[in-house]
Image (tube, rainbow, N blue to C red):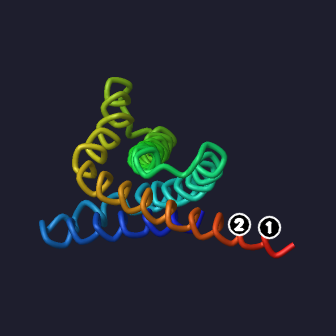
Amino acid sequence: MQTGLLCAVLGALTAAAFFVLTGGWWFLRESSLSIGVGLIALFVAAGHMGMQTAVYLCWRGNTVGLGIGLGIALAFVSIACSGLAGSVFYVLINAVQGTLRMRDIPLLLFGPTLSLILFGALPAVVLGVVYGLLTGMQLEKLQSIKYTDQHRL
């Protein structure tokens, strides 16, 4: 769980740096509540699925390739959950205020998610590899402790 959250924080910081370098602060001010909901969803998804992925890797066997592949998948799924949560929140807020047209709903729901996946692809792959390697090292350490404890008895 900790490794998944660490990678989520690094991904969020990467996105913030991207907005600073490209001058996209206007976007952050305009939809800050939706971004906040998306960040919460990112951390919840990365934490929960990161823990489940680590349990699966421990059960399945600690292979580097599987860990990296699952780490990359975890990164993309976390980004998708984040984008959908923020988009749904944005649509609901605008629907309550009455400023939403029905024809805009598909674009508002899936446009930001697809943009996040597109622009977050490179950081997601890099952080997925980092997750896979860090989780692999943690599992190796746990297995070595388990092995030495069994041989002490």
Q: Residue at x 44, y 41 (%)?
A: 84
For this rendering, which residue is in front, 127 or 22?
127
Hey, which quadrant is residue 16 in on the image?
A: bottom left
Task: Answer whether labels 1 and 2 touch (C-beta < 8 Å).
Answer: yes
Q: Residue at x 44, y 38 (%)?
A: 98
Q: Which mark is residue 150?
A: 1
- Whether residue 85 is visible to the viewer of this picture, yes or no, is yes
Residue 55 left/right relative to 8: right
Q: How far across and how far down the image is residue 1, in percent? A: 60, 62
Q: Which mark is residue 147?
A: 2
Q: Residue at x 38, y 62 (%)?
A: 130
For this rendering, which residue is in front, 128 or 59?
59
For this rendering, which residue is in front, 143 or 85?
143
Q: Could you tell me which quadrant the C terminus lies in? A: bottom right
Hey, which quadrant is residue 107 in on the image?
A: top left
Q: Residue at x 56, y 67 (%)?
A: 138
Q: Is residue 149 above or below residue 43?
A: below
* Outermost residue, left side: 22
Q: Which mark is residue 95?
A: none
Secondary structure under badge 1? helix
Amino acid at dot 1: Gln
